Image: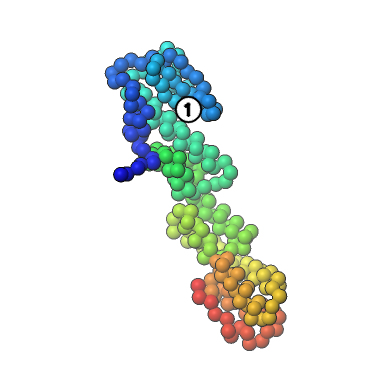
Amino acid sequence: MVIQLNPEPEEQEEQVLAHFPENELLEITRVELQKKSKHRYIIHFGAYNMTVHEDVMIKYRMINGNTFIKADLEEIIVADERQRAYVEGLRYLERKARTALEMTRRLREKEIGETIIAEVLQRLQQERLIDDSLYAKQWAEQRIMNQRKGKMRIRQELREKGIDKSLISEVLENISPEQELEIALETGRKKWNLIRDDAAGKRNKTGAFLMRRGFTGEMVRQVLNTLLQEEDFEGEEKEIYYND
């Protein structure tokens, strides 16, 4: 048995309008605000009813006395689903920026159909509310400058958020090896000075810390050699080796 969580618009129409009569003029007899849902209304056609978003209700003039046929309502159902998805998308963007993949996953969780998701995603991109290029640039800058993470870690995080590989490479090219090494050294020195241990202990713990933050093995080796030299631990650098 297959359970589909995100029905397509045609299936959504069939579910909502399953009991509505075919080829019959349907007159709106009552319109009421839906409880617990501030912008949705219940539209009554005598014994039948459906719910729509306020914007959709206004657009299609769904007021007392106006009449529709089932085909009209099928179009309205699709428009309502599209509006619901868009509103959900805006709500998801309220706290912070999102990638296209994150938005797609969110709308799927809300059981929005794939066709509607594609349409809403395109609209959000056209309105520059979703911009993977800008997102990747800001994410990389924030991670390396504020959180002191290396390119390897940033690359993995952006992949998980659905950013295209070529875009990730383009963004990371803006971070020079010298800049990354300087940040790795500052981060490593701070960790090093907090550790109360002998040279081997400080080296191992600082090295593991830097690797977890996404700096390459070669960069970690350079940082540790510098830190050892700063404390005059002669000869220790020969033992340092990390795989990426």
Is 134 situated above or below 78?
below
Residue farthest bottom in this picture = 235
Say whether residue 71 is left or right of residue 166.
left
Is 222 situated above or below 167?
below
What secondary structure is marked by label 1?
strand
Residue at (48, 40) in percent of width and height = 124
Q: Nearer the viewer, residue 154 or 132?
A: 154
Residue 242 drawn at (x, y percent) = 53, 77
Residue at (62, 63) in percent of width and height = 148
Classify mark 1: residues with Cα within 10 Å, few (<14), some (14-19) or many (20+): many
Residue 219 drawn at (x, y percent) = 57, 73
Residue at (48, 53) in percent of width and height = 161
Q: Which image quarter is the N terminus in?
A: top left
Camera sees residue 106 = yes
Disc 1 residue type? His
Residue at (44, 20) in percent of width and height = 43
Residue 171 drawn at (x, y percent) = 51, 58
Is 10 situated above or below 233?
above
Is 100 situated above or below 200?
above
Q: Nearer the viewer, residue 128 or 63?
A: 63
Residue tagged 1: 53
Say whether residue 128 is left or right of residue 188.
left
Camera sees residue 167 = no
Residue farthest left in this picture = 23
